Image (cartoon, rainbow, N blue to C red):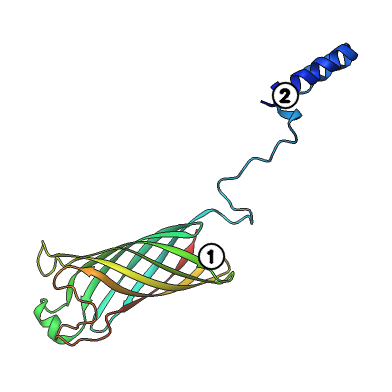
Amino acid sequence: MIRDLLAPLGLALTLAAPAWAQNTVDEIPYEDASGPEAPAADGASTASGEPFARGRVAAQGFLVDGKAIGGLVVGFAASAFRMDLGFNLAWATDERSQASLDGDGFFGSVVDIHLGARVELTEMFAVEAGSGLDLWWLFALHSEEVKLAMPLYAAVEATLAQQFFGRLEARGYLLASDGLMVGRSFDGEDTVPLFFTASAGVWF
């Protein structure tokens, strides 16, 4: 369209001064005539120079009564979004539960897949909320015993030196398989239907 608009102007200049007009059209590339070339966008970083997407790895522990649950979390953050995949092993720590689990208390694993939205409050602190899927594979009780839950979580995170971070998360279940009840102990006692996790790790 720009070239079409310039065509009549180029013709008029050629009639007035053929050599000058012809050299102008031949020597100036069409792209340059439209203005300075914009710098190439860098898809790997933001305008501030920070990476657009970063990976992370962390050790995670569940802060629950009567159980010891912990493992490893890997994930990444891209812009305001974050995704994590966690794998945890689980033991019962109270004597009654251990007695029913061959004495060692081990009862299975917890796999959590979470997607959340993240808001940076300062350079150090951020908050996050999201959902996903928690899979409780209770293979020490029965090889086919699998419980699923849809969590809703909120978390606060502190980052030090742009690399190391600590995180505290509160999690509850919107939906869960029968028998998977947050806030109920092995002996049937009901408490607050939330549990907490804590993690520490590094960005890379």
Is label 1 in a helix, a strand or a loop? loop
**Front position among marks 2 and 1:** 2
Specify whether 121 is left or right of 38: left
Amino acid type assigned to the residue bearing label 1 in the image: Gln
The number of discs equals 2
The reply to whether residue 17 is in sight is no
Badge 2 is on which residue? 5
Sequence-wise, the earlier of marks 2 and 1 is: 2
The one nearer the camera, 176 or 197, is 176
What crowding class fits label 2: few (fewer than 14 Cα within 10 Å), some (14-19), or many (20 or more)?
A: few
Q: Can you tell which quarter of the image residue 11 is in?
A: top right
Specify whether 201 is left or right of 3: left
Q: Is residue 125 above or below residue 78?
A: below
The one nearer the camera, 89 or 82, is 82
Is label 2 in a helix, a strand or a loop? helix
The one nearer the camera, 24 or 61, is 24
Q: Which residue is found at the position 68% from the left and 41% from the top?
A: 39
Amino acid type assigned to the residue bearing label 2 in the image: Leu
The reply to whether residue 50 is in sight is yes
Q: Which residue is found at the position 40% from the left and 63% from the top?
A: 116
Residue 147: x and y in percent read 17, 66
Badge 1 is on which residue? 163
Residue 12: x and y in percent read 84, 16
**Residue that sits furthest to the right in the current view:** 17
For residue 62, the mark is none
